[in-house]
Image (tube, rainbow, N blue to C red):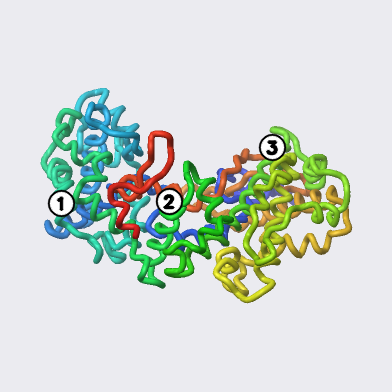
């Protein structure tokens, strides 16, 4: 009888491909979904306002010329190249004003320029020398936002109801015309397109149209334009109330400043109050990310640890004593009338060691959950954890979950709690990896988005982790607003209303 040795499925054992992946413990699911609702029209990859106008104009031209998808795609790619070159040429001139986001594809185009004018057929093509790997250029980064703002149709590559061709054509027709007729383009060839540079959008006709789109319509309560307008008015109110140099200054106003609820625009709808809950929830999300990154850093580059050993690394950075005593030493999250207090920014919290401070932030988030659920339903509570019964509002690692955990562990030591949290994070990361893994038929590989691997009770590090603050898209909204003249920034970095700031009233 012939004996056969079986190793197991080869496509699992021999062709598994770990990739970096995003959101390894999926603690930001509710926050990300809520931010998408409350900051419509931008994402983390929409960096340059004039692409909204350019894409709309190309879609209009494709319709007018009755182009099929292939020809429309080619015109889009060629137009993005010419636009990028126009921005690059003007930035190198004496007339360029200020610092602005770079056009997409600049690195590839700079490389191409080293050999002479950019060959549009090559750069807009799909082979070597292409400026973008995506078939539709950089449309993919903007299309969802462009559909949200009505620039593009939701059904095809065509203009949406809010697109206005006259001001956009007046500003950018030269870009599309050159993209249509030229075989190659040098920086000298686009010198006459200075008005197309991003630095000019604050004063251009298409910039005025874009400013109206990004200002929203705050009084259209319950609509996307209404939510966008109320969010923009909140940001404008913050920069008028106190000096705002960065996102932390804006966060303090939104989370804690009582003037936020007395401003003349505060009660147009309930968006401002929902943002108060949302921004406060972000404190807990960031604390979890920081704890997870610290655990990943504790793992050796080779070798492994048990989840309990990882937890002991966190426990070593916690003070002695019970959780009950720890909780009693934290600052209050509200005053006697329910006004939020800056507990997360209290010196007694900020002066703690890292892990101690992050766990304190989680417990404070649990206290805010308790306070928000102690009375009638409010916009702040809905912003903090969603509508009543929302599954993401009560999931593992949420403030609701932390509140339940602290109640259960209140008479245990802080060290025991730290070990428990580490084990929960490791097990959760393992489940998230398994849920996101998939078999890629194109190359017969099993793809695993993973930072650490839990195998037979041991944890191995595959990829490192950098804890970044969760995105609320405020930076993108403020950048777009500055580009189109709704906001401005002084030389000292302080934000102010821009030349079109009246649109935010």
Residue under label 2, please give it: 240
Point out the residue furthest to the bottom here.
376
Q: Secondary structure at mark 2?
A: helix
Q: Viewed as shown, does residue 225 lie left or right of 391?
A: left
Q: Secondary structure at mark 3?
A: helix
Residue 243 visible in the shown view: yes
Mark 3: few/some/many CA within 10 Å (<14, 14-19, 20+): some
Q: Position of residue 141 (x, y in %)?
A: 37, 50
Q: Position of residue 407 (x, y in %)?
A: 81, 63
Q: Earlier in the sequence, mark 1 or mark 2?
A: 1
Which quadrant of the figure has residue 363?
bottom right
Q: Give the foreground label among 1 and 3.
A: 1
Front-most of residues 234 and 39:
234
Front-most of residues 428 and 374:
374
Residue 137 against residue 184 in the figure, above or below: below
Q: Position of residue 209 (x, y in %)?
A: 24, 55
Mark 2: few/some/many CA within 10 Å (<14, 14-19, 20+): few
Q: Position of residue 125 (x, y in %)?
A: 25, 41
Q: Quadrant of the C terminus?
A: bottom left
Residue 2 visible in the shown view: no
Q: Secondary structure at mark 1?
A: helix
Q: Viewed as shown, does residue 343 lie left or right of 80?
A: right
Q: Which mark is residue 101?
A: none
Name the residue: 47% across, 45% down: 244
Residue under label 1, please give it: 169
Residue under label 3, please give it: 297
Whether label 1 touches label 3, CB < 8 Å: no
Name the residue: 38% across, 46% down: 496
Q: Viewed as shown, does residue 167 lie left or right of 252?
A: left
């Amino acid at each position: 009888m012939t004996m056969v040795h079986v190793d197991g499925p080869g496509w699992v054992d021999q062709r598994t491909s770990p990739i970096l992946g995003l959101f390894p413990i999926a603690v930001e699911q509710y926050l990300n979904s809520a931010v998408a609702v409350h900051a419509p029209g931008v994402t983390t990859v929409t960096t340059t306002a004039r692409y909204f106008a350019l894409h709309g104009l190309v879609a209009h031209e494709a319709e007018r010329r009755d182009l099929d998808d292939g020809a429309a795609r080619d015109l889009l790619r060629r137009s993005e190249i010419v636009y990028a070159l126009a921005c690059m040429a003007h930035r190198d001139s004496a007339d360029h004003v200020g610092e602005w986001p770079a056009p997409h594809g600049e690195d590839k185009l700079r490389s191409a320029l080293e050999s002479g004018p950019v060959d549009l057929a090559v750069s807009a093509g799909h082979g070597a020398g292409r400026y973008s790997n995506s078939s539709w250029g950089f449309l993919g980064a903007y299309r969802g936002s462009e559909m949200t703002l009505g620039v593009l149709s939701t059904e095809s590559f065509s203009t949406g109801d809010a697109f206005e061709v006259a001001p956009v054509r007046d500003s950018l027709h030269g870009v599309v015309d050159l993209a249509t007729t030229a075989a190659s383009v040098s920086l000298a060839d686009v010198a006459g397109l200075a008005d197309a540079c991003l630095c000019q959008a604050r004063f251009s006709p298409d910039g005025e149209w874009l400013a109206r789109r990004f200002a929203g319509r705050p009084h259209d309560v319950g609509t996307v334009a209404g939510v966008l307008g109320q969010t923009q008015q909140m940001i404008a109110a913050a920069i008028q109330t106190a000096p705002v140099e960065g996102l932390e200054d804006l966060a303090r106003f939104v989370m804690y400043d009582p003037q936020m609820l007395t401003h003349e625009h505060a009660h147009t709808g309930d968006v401002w109050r929902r943002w108060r809950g949302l921004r406060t929830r972000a404190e807990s999300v960031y604390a979890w990310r920081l704890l997870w990154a610290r655990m990943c850093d504790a793992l050796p580059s080779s070798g492994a640890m048990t989840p309990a050993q990882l937890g002991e690394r966190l426990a070593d950075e916690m003070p002695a004593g019970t959780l009950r005593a720890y909780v009693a030493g934290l600052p209050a999250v509200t005053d006697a009338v329910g006004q939020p207090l800056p507990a997360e920014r209290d010196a007694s919290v900020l002066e703690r060691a890292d892990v101690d401070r992050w766990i304190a932030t989680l417990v404070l988030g649990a206290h805010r959950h308790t306070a928000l659920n102690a009375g009638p339903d409010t916009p702040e509570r809905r912003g903090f954890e969603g509508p009543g019964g929302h599954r993401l509002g009560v999931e593992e690692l949420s403030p609701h979950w932390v509140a339940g955990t602290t109640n259960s562990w209140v008479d245990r030591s802080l060290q025991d709690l730290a070990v428990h949290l580490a084990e929960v994070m490791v097990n959760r990361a393992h489940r998230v990896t398994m849920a996101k893994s998939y078999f890629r038929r194109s190359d017969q590989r099993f793809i695993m988005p993973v930072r650490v691997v839990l195998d037979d009770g041991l944890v191995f590090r595959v990829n490192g982790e950098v804890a970044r603050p969760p995105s609320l898209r405020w930076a993108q909204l403020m950048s777009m607003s500055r580009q189109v003249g709704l906001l401005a920034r002084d030389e000292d970095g302080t934000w102010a209303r821009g030349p079109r700031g009246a649109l935010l009233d």
